[in-house]
Amino acid sequence: MRLSLLSILIMSTLLVKSNPEVTCTDTIVNLAYTAQYVEDPEGRITIETLLGQPDMFQFKQVSKQTISFGLTSSYYWIRLTLMDQTANRLHVQIASNPLTDIKFYETKGLHVLQQYHTGNWQSFNKRPVKHIDYIFPLEVAKGASTTVYIRVMHLRGTQFPLYAGPLKAFYEADSTRILINGIYYGLILLMVMYNLFIYYSLKDKSYLFYVAYVFLIALLNASMDGYAFQYFWPSLPAINQYEDIFASLVGIAAILFVISFLNTKANASLLHRILIGLAVAYIVTIAIIASKHFMIGSSIMEIVSLASVISIFITALVILKKGFRPAKFFLVAWTMLLVSIIVFILKDFNLLPYNQLTVNSFRFGSGVEAVLLSIALADRIKLFRNEKARAQLERIQSLQEKATMQHEMIELEARALRSQMNPHFIFNCLNSIKGLIQKKEGHKAITYLTTFSKLLRTILQNMDKREITLYDEIEICRVYTQLECMRFGNKFAYSFSVDPKLDIKSIQVPALILQPFIENAIWHGLMPKKEAGYLTLSVEIRDGIVACIIDDNGIGRKHSALHKIKHHASDHQSKGVTLSQSRLNLDNSLNKRNATVETIDKLDEHCDAAGTTVILSFKEY
């Protein structure tokens, strides 16, 4: 039923009287204590309805220091009555940014004197006062009263302080906030530039992830403070709708930094998979927000953020216990951030009061965290430098040891060459040739001389080589054995055989490594024997291992030792074998050849010595 003009005026007067009046002077006045509010879940209440049908709504008293409705998507109408006693024009300030949508009405009775439509989804240039907070000038004359209605809504939680006072007082109160923000953003910029420089120097992707993380945190804070809207995209309010995407990108950058810095894949595989899952959850959150489900996306983002910080905290703790020292600073940094995020989220859910501490908790925590993470990175550089220095020292020591072994190898090779070119052997060969000439056995003398020259030529050709092919080594042994057999009147028979599967021309062995064992078998196994003997050299392949088997039916090692003592024989040949064993040991250390020597004493059916078998084994390469 339509109300009469008189009844509307009476109810309007009663409505104003029921709303406590606030006297505003030249100082800033907190309006929250006297503000009244009504919830509008569907956003259908209009200013005309409020003024024309006031009895339909039951306004409640705020009676708190800060207006706070928690995490909600409802619209709220706030009503308050002001008495202007300022020397200059009176202004109302909503000291919070961002808020999604704000409609401000100054009324007198049933009339709207002026109105403003602003908020984070409206162009910054349309604000009545170009300020990061929402400031509204009033038309009320000094000494007069006016009633103000404010409709607010924010998808992240509708919380804000509400003040009144002259514009000059608001700007003067901003000096402390400007100083704090200047220090914060200056610190962040310093961390970004410093670590970006280190990244270009070291090319360590951990620094790149850190720079991305810190930059995105600064961008998120700038967006929440309103600076990004004011300076970066004042005419693009649509970007502010997706503010929580910045927060999700911060989470992804943080996880990438943690994975790289703490090497979670190697140090904590289960937690590594959890972090990967949280990164995927952030991506899903971005998709939800991009599809304009802002309230759902905001709630999921805050839950995932809390889970991420806790997971990162546990990861750092686990890896610190494993002895990774830089994780100590990392753990302290994330503890600070964890506390700040918990405080910030509890404030959004209206579980903690809205004040300077809770509002700025994330900024403070992220600033301290950025510094501590930079220290952690610096400590990691120090640790890596120490490890690099230690590795270089070990490498130098290894090179010195290798140089020493190479020097010993050269000496052994020279001694081995001298062993092969023993003056007694040369004298005996030449003496045998002389005897054949004196006996008029010229054909045999020529054959002996040809064979002897072939042996000398082969040895001299290979004397400057540390490695020769197995083919050349066998040829040296064949020619040497032929000479010794001729010199001793064919007292022993010999044979050489090679597995046809082997390409002995492609297999490298230490030069002159087999000959001392052949010589030892002839001189100390076969020569002391009264009967004719035999000597065989066979080369086989056994599971990728090349085996050179030198077998004789001589008197054996035990009787050979007794024979040397009895006849005062030279120990030349024993030294040759010892030199070969030493060369193999050094070659194994230098070239990882894993060559082995195995000596087997053969016995007959009566357990008497029946000869000796020597097996030299090399890898096939």
Image (cartoon, helix red, strand yellow):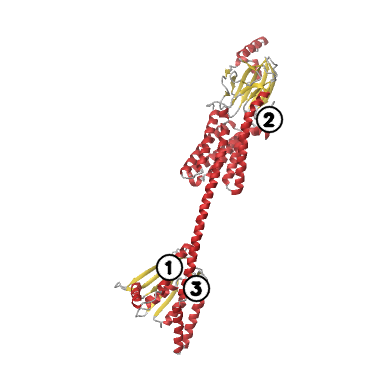
Crowding at mark 3 (Cα within 10 Å: few <14, some 14-19, many 20+): some
- Residue found 49% across the figure and 47% down from its top: 266
Q: Position of residue 234 (x, y in %)?
A: 68, 32
- Mark 1 lies on a secondary structure that is helix
Look at label 1 and name its amino acid: Gln
Q: Marks 3 and 1, Cα distance to the nearest angstrom?
A: 20 Å
Q: Where is residue 238 in the image (x, y as percent from the top left)?
A: 66, 33
Residue 601 drawn above or below residue 17:
below
Q: Do the residues under discs 3 and 2 have CB atoms within 8 angstroms? A: no
Q: Mark 3 points at which residue?
A: 472
Observer-side mark, 2 or 1, equals 1
Name which of mark 2 and mark 1 comes first in the sequence. 2
Q: Mark 2 points at which residue?
A: 124
Q: Marks 3 and 2, Cα distance to the nearest angstrom?
A: 89 Å
- Mark 3 lies on a secondary structure that is helix
Q: Which of 137 and 89 is in front in this view?
A: 89
Look at label 2 and name its amino acid: Phe
Which numbered circle lies on residue 435? none
Crowding at mark 1 (Cα within 10 Å: few <14, some 14-19, many 20+): some
Quarter of the figure with the N terminus = top right
Q: Mark 1 points at which residue?
A: 581
Taking the view exactly as shown, the residue that stands out farthest to the left is 606
Look at label 3 and name its amino acid: Asp
Q: In this view, does 390 lie to the left or right of 153?
A: left
Q: In this view, does 243 lie to the left or right of 342?
A: right
Residue 33 drawn above or below residue 258:
above
Q: Marks 2 and 1, Cα distance to the nearest angstrom?
A: 88 Å
- Mark 2 lies on a secondary structure that is helix
Q: Can residue 472 be seen in this view?
A: yes
Q: Quadrant of residue 292?
A: top right
Q: In which quarter of the image is residue 227?
A: top right
